Amino acid sequence: MSKPQKKTDAIPAPIGAISPAKARILTAAIDLFYEKGYERTTVRDIADKAGILSGSLFHHFKSKQDILYTAMAMTTQAMGEGALKAVEGITDPVAQLKALVLVELASIHRKDGHAAYVLVDEWRSLDPEHREAVLALRDNSYERCWTEALEGCAKKGLLKNTPSLARQLIRGSLAWTRNWYRKGGPLTLEALADEVVGTFLTL
Amino acid sequence: MSKPQKKTDAIPAPIGAISPAKARILTAAIDLFYEKGYERTTVRDIADKAGILSGSLFHHFKSKQDILYTAMAMTTQAMGEGALKAVEGITDPVAQLKALVLVELASIHRKDGHAAYVLVDEWRSLDPEHREAVLALRDNSYERCWTEALEGCAKKGLLKNTPSLARQLIRGSLAWTRNWYRKGGPLTLEALADEVVGTFLTL
DNA sequence: GGTTGACAACCAAGCGCTTGCTTGTTTTTA
DNA sequence: TAAAAACAAGCAAGCGCTTGGTTGTCAACC
């Protein structure tokens, strides 16, 4: 018994099963982060919204930072699965791209349960170690889908930029929609997705 | 003299002359906001960097929020002037657009004295009233340049989207460069600007 | 089937610290 | 010599988080 070392506690734990209580807290936290940002959101705010006292939060999460990390990691994982499902069965890279753009837009504007905007707005609030962990998680599935679609387009000569540059430009365009796009207006998400795809491809 | 009303104190004051001391504080604050964001930056941080004690800040600014507002308003005004100067004498709308893209990129990555990134990152930290004031300031000159250039391109049939949609997509692409673009790499800001213009126009 | 113990979830209270900001005084500047 | 600028000290409030005790739940045991 020279080295105890039961658990690798130094490196952030993987995202396993989430208890109902944890899920409730995460939902509340994500809503508040969306409205006010991480820093302006207090643990008391989160607890209030989740219907418990602030101290009880720390029975489920070891810190406020842990809540953010879990939210981002969970969302990343969910988006990876969503992206995989979106391109499933599609072989045309243009159609793949269109599907991926729509998934990302829908996530940002909360058409589903995800919460992609935390992955847009809160990078700076996430500790460097956690940041790397989330990035690794993202590159593993979500970005892989994008790369595949974009490289497919490039091979057909449809892409104006290199795939990696195109990815960053598109990501920026989509992320910024958070600051101006409103559902219910004349422009639907689908139409917006078409516009974006049409912009970055030479069709 | 039925109404005193010496100064419209309710609505944020306009940006007049900035004293040297104020300018020093603002520079320090902008640096820190850039590194850590508004919320994580304390008034003591700002004072330290400016070479004074924290209490002395409030001789120059009435609140921390006032520092942010002044920084954003000042930056907005400077960018308006920068944009005007950039398109000065240029009649070709494509060349205008290229110049404007470069100005915005340079500001975001602090190649000049401006600090456009606060206009990207810190909107949520700015009080609603101040926010409107800055937006009005922006639309007054800076956005006017963009609208003119984009409408010029549209008239020539070079634009893929409507000018207003193109503006938002471009703005997003440029803003997001903050999260991936690093100076000193193989891609210069000028080359990046060319890529962006080439992407959004049908040349 | 009633008692018991173990455990997770939560409450109640508050600790130690940091925050933005204020006040009264001293120094610097013009 | 008076205004502007900076200091020195600290307040009140709010922050993340800890602690110790109270519930509710459910399987194990006689």
Image (cartoon, coloured by chain):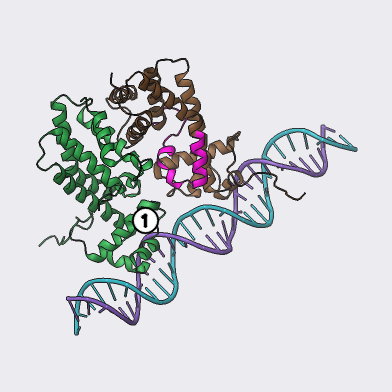
Chain colours: A brown, B green, C purple, D cyan
Pick out the residue farthest to the front: B186
Q: Is residue A133 magenta?
A: yes
Q: Is residue B202 magenta?
A: no
Q: Residue at x 28, y 27 (%)?
A: A185
Q: Residue at x 27, y 25 (%)?
A: A186
Question: For this view, does A109 lie left or right of residue A17?
Answer: left
Q: Which residues are magenta?
A: A109-137
Residue D27 figure quarter: top right
Residue A122 figure quarter: top left
Residue holding disc 1: B32
Amino acid residing under circle 1 = Leu
Where is residue A83 shown, x and y percent of the image?
A: 46, 25
Where is residue B112 shown, x and y percent of the image?
A: 25, 51
User: Can residue B163 be seen?
Assistant: yes
Front-lying residue, B171 or D28: B171
Q: Against B152, is D19 above or below?
A: below
